[in-house]
Every structure is written in structure tokens, then in C-alpha cells.
Amino acid sequence: MSGSVPTGYRPLTVEEVPDYVRARPELSVLAGDGRLTVREVGDGNLNLVFIVRSDPDVPGLVLKQSLPWVRVFGEGWPLTIERARHEADAYEVHSRFSGTTTPRYHVFDPVRYVIAMEDLADLRVWRGALNDGEIHAEAPATLGTYVARIGFHTSDLGMDPEARKRLLARTVNPELCRITEDLVLTEPLRVHEHNRYDPELEPVVAALRADTPALDGLSVLKHRFMTRAEALIHGDLHTGSVMVGDGRTVAIDPEFAFYGPVGFDLGAIWANGVIATVRAVLLDRPADFQAHVEGIVGTSWAAFLDELGRLWPSRVDTAFTDGMRAAWERAVWDDALGFAGAKAMRRMVGFAHVADVESLARPLRIRASRVVLAVARRLLVERDTITTPGDLATLVRAAIEGTD
Ligand code: SR1
Ligand code: MG
């Protein structure tokens, strides 16, 4: 139903949100008594997000509504509103095992495609916090644990195989997968109208487009993304999909959720960890902050392995041997590195960029992009040589040193 909408659907406006809430007792009680104030705060690429409060200083609730198009592009790029249903389904499934890393999810409106969920406005988006030099020490490990729990509890490790297949069928998300297949796993190495980058980068981007090993590497990853239906992954776990504060780390926006490779979620965190590290080093941020962002890969990976080890004895099928676990961990490591490369590259040359680099003034922005592209190429083509998080950190530092 890309672009088309069912009867009764229309985008909400700030003015009509109070009546929308008061007409629904289960939401009205969450918003509190008194006159409701509403702010539209959606700053992502796709959706409307309203914070609804009766007391401006007390959390109320958040309404998130999908639009039948890509918000940052406009009505010329239709996109199914079903993505809100996929996000609601992912919250419902993930909340069974992810604790406070999933926001409290209240209800989904199947007519207006509105998700009612926890008001997290007292937390902040992790990307912005990192760009401001804030350390939220618990975030990388919390996310590694979260990915492990998804990888266990929604896969054949933690689910009855028939129930898993039924969940897989219910959560097929073709339109949103198509966005990733195009914007992340195809277009950055093609000439495409979606792509944009500073003109100084043209020689390096043109060289990448002619680089057969890089093209091969990206297409291998695209095929893995399309075929490795391991678990109900988040699907877009970059630092803009994470909120932090008061010691809590929350993964939001799982509208890209589908049965895919577990390493894709780790790769999203790692790509953004690499980009944050490049920014921190080029801005000469304090050593403890540099160590924090440089440690995002290693800390999240260690937490992933720890949690998987903790869950392993409770696997539903003991025919999965310890040797199989070791082989799967190696496969996830390889996927995560590869997808990190693809995701880092798309943020430099593709449709959707990141403030980490965009907010840098030239010539630092150009240098940061060159460094990230150099690291991304290594991750696409030569990741066999990267066997530990320390190897990747060394590679990033060397790329910074070797790039003017
Ligand atoms: C057209 S949507 C662009 C990007 O925004 C989302 O956050 C995903 O990363 C998607 O690729
Ligand atoms: Mg998003």
C-alpha cells in the first residue's frame, strides 16, 4: 500500500492532538488532568512525533504517526504508513525481554497509524549527546545486551521454530527493507540522484564507484541483508535511534524491524561509533571522551558475547552445539564489521547524512569524510584482517593520521 492510505487516515495536527487524546480514555489517563500542551518534535527523516503533557514539567505521553511519504523529502517520495505497525509490533515483541531498553509502548491506532508510547523527552538523542561531548558510559554495553537478547529470544535459539516462522511471516517489512537495500546497500556506490557530498570528495567517491572489490563487498552484504532471516532485528540502530539520560539507554524507532542478520544492528552502532570517534579525534576532544567513543565497538561486542553466553544454556534446541555458537559469533562479527562499513559509507555520500560530520566546518568536514570512507572501504573489502575491536580502533587512528 505504498503511498495509499486506508479510509479514516489523515495526518494529525498539533491543534487536534488534545481532542484525539481526550477521545481515547486509555490515552487520556496517561496525559493527566487539565489542559494539554502539545509540541511536534519529529526530527527524524520520516514521521510526526508529538509530546503531549498536562504539566510541562512532568512526562505525559508521545504520539508517533507515520506519514504516507518520506518527511524530509516530501510527498514526491511515497512510503507506506504500515511502518508504524511494524514499529508497534517490534516494541511489543522486544519489550518481553529487553526491560527498560525498549520504551513503554501503550497502544497502536490502526486507523490513524499512531503509536502511543512513553514520553522520553527528559532523555536526549545519543547522537546529539555524543556531538556535545557527553559520556553516557552505560550506553554501549546496554545496546550490546539488547542486540544479544533480540538475537536469542526472537531466533531459533530462544523460540520454538514454528512460532518463530509465524512471527517472521507476520513481521515481513518489504518497503522499509527496500529503503535499506537501496539507500545503504546500493546507491552509495552508484551515480544516483539521492547521493550528495562535498565536491572535494568527488575523486575518492568516483574511485570507490570503480572499485570492483568494494562493489563486490557491498553486494555480498546486500545479499546477506536480504537472505539472513535470523532474528526480529531493530533494523536502524544508529545513534539517532537511541535515547540516553539518567543512566538509562533506550532504543527507539524500530520501524525498519524485520527478520534479518543480527550483525546488522551491531553494525549500525559500530558505524556510528567510528564516525563519533573520527569527530572526537579531529576536534581534539578530552582523552576520556575519545576513549569512550573509541570503546563503543569493543564494549558493545563484549556485552553482546556476555549476554549470549548467559542465555545459551536456555536455548530451546540443544542440538545447537557450543561449536555452532562459536561459528555463529564469528559470522555475526563479520556481518557487523561489513554492515558498519556500508552504513558509515552511506552517511558520507548517500541520501541521509549525520550531524557528527555535517556540523563540522570545512576543511575538517572533508577530512572527516575522507577518513570515514577509507575505514568503510577496509570494512567492505579487508575485514578479515580485523579480528578484535582493538584492530578496528587501530585502523581508525591510522586512517586519521594518514588523511589530510
Ligand atoms: C528515506 S529514509 C532515510 C533513512 O532514515 C532512516 O533513519 C533510515 O536510516 C533510512 O535509511
Ligand atoms: Mg528512524
Image (spheres, helix red, strand yellow):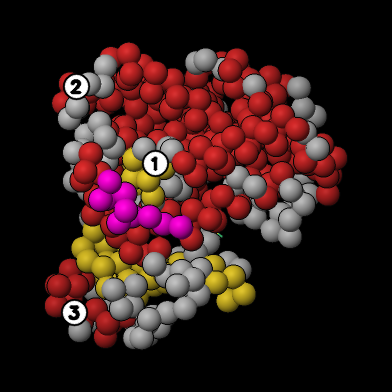
Q: Amino acid at mark 2?
A: Thr
How many numbered marks does the figure carry? 3
Q: Which element is circle 1 on?
A: loop
Q: Which quadrant holds residue 329? A: top left
Labels 3 and 2: the sequence-earlier one: 3
**Which residue is rendered at x = 34% and y = 72% of the image?**
113
Labels 1 and 2: the sequence-earlier one: 1
Q: Amino acid at mark 1?
A: Ala
Q: Which element is circle 3 on?
A: loop
Where residue 371 sits: x, y (%)? 70, 32
Q: Residue 229 bears which disc, if any?
A: 1
Where residue 27 sits: x, y (%)? 19, 72
In the rendered image, residue 169 lying in the magenta stretch gets the answer yes
**Which residue is rendered at x = 43% and y = 38% of the image?**
228
Front-most of residues 120 and 71: 71
Residue where numbered disc 2 is placed: 318
Where residue 169 sits: x, y (%)? 32, 53
Considering the image in quadrants, where does the N terminus appear?
A: bottom left
- Residue at mark 3 to residue at mark 2: CA–CA distance: 47 Å
Q: Residue 326 bears which disc, if any?
A: none
Residue where numbered disc 3 is placed: 24
Labels 3 and 1: the sequence-earlier one: 3
